[in-house]
Image (cartoon, rainbow, N blue to C red):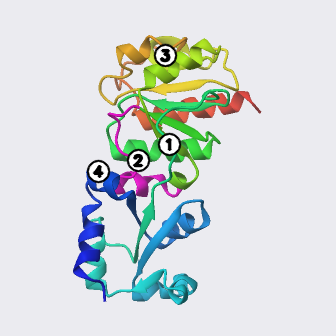
Amino acid sequence: MVTKAQIQLVRSLADKQARRETGLFVVEGVKMIREALASSFCVERIYVGEGVADAFAQELRQGMAEAVSAKELERLSHLRTPSQAVALVRMPENGGRAGEAFGEELALCLDNVQDPGNLGTILRVADWFGIGEVLCSPDSADCYNSKVVQATMGAIFRVRVRYAPVAEALAGAVRRGVPVYGTFLEGEDIYRAELTSRGVIVMGNEGRGIGAETAACVTRKLFVPPFPAERHGSESLNVAVATAVVCAEFRRRMR
């Protein structure tokens, strides 16, 4: 039986400050938890519903997991529709700053991306296109928010995410001769621009785009054009969609 203290701990991790203090975050669903177990992340505890006990037979035998009732799962889950399994996972110690090699391989930089769904989708996009590092400004959504974690569909366990002042990291990349790309309405058509296999792709806030301080570090401005070019429809693309388009074009050039 799950104790009241265990339930309180899991429920408290809906709060960012509690996640920071404990170093733990919540992962839900059989597939996501299996991904966590297969990764370098440390899974500390799994609460397993009766219907999925077979999927965690080894963990149940080892004492890492415990069987719980449907009512207990409802109290543990952070989701509107409770999952059949809930896990506590320890955050990795990635450090706060981008390394000296930031941008030597294609990397992403997010400037104040606020929506958890957008951040989760962007991490999934990064994983799909083989981009191993994402640097987020401190005011971006927390990647260990349950909505972000679920939206990544497991990418959170494969993509390194750091939080640090992005202008400082980008300025360092520029000093090393690393190209810094950003998306702007006045930018060059991405389908005609020269793109490189290394560099940093900067994506901005959902409503305001890339901030002025960050924009000052961008060395190559890009634009994803509508079709046809003279069409006047939507003002812009959703940031996660735009990220997917930009990353796809970079990778297409490398084939």
Cβ–Cβ below 8 Å for labels 2 and 1?
Answer: yes
Between marks 4 and 2, how big is the CA–CA gap?
10 Å
Q: Which residue is mark 4?
A: 16
Marks 4, 2: nearer the viewer: 4
What kind of secondary structure does the magenta stretch mostly adopt? loop
Q: Residue at x 34, y 41 (%)?
A: 141
Q: Residue at x 39, y 31 (%)?
A: 137
Q: Callout 3 environment at 10 Å: few (<14), some (14 to 19), or many (20+)?
A: few
The amino acid on which the numbered mark 3 sits, given as a three-letter code, is Ala
The amino acid on which the numbered mark 1 sits, given as a three-letter code, is Val
Picture quadrant where residue 48 is located = bottom left
| Residue toward you, 113 or 58 | 58
- The x and y percentages for residue 130 are 65, 42
Q: Which residue is mark 1?
A: 161
Q: In the picture shown, does residue 196 fall above or below 80?
A: above
**Is residue 253 part of the magenta span, yes or no?**
no
Q: Which residue is mark 2?
A: 143
Picture quadrant where residue 49 is located = bottom left
**In the rendered image, is residue 63 in sight?**
yes
Q: Which residue is mark 3?
A: 229
| Residue toward you, 234 or 44 | 44
Q: Which SS class for mark 1?
A: strand
Quadrant of the frame with the C terminus: top right
Q: Which SS class for mark 2?
A: loop
Quadrant of the frame with the N terminus: bottom left
Between marks 2 and 1, how big is the CA–CA gap?
8 Å
Between marks 4 and 1, how big is the CA–CA gap?
16 Å
The amino acid on which the numbered mark 2 sits, given as a three-letter code, is Cys
Please report whichever mark, 3 or 1, sits nearer to the chain's N-terminal start.
1
Q: Residue at x 52, y 37 (%)?
A: 134
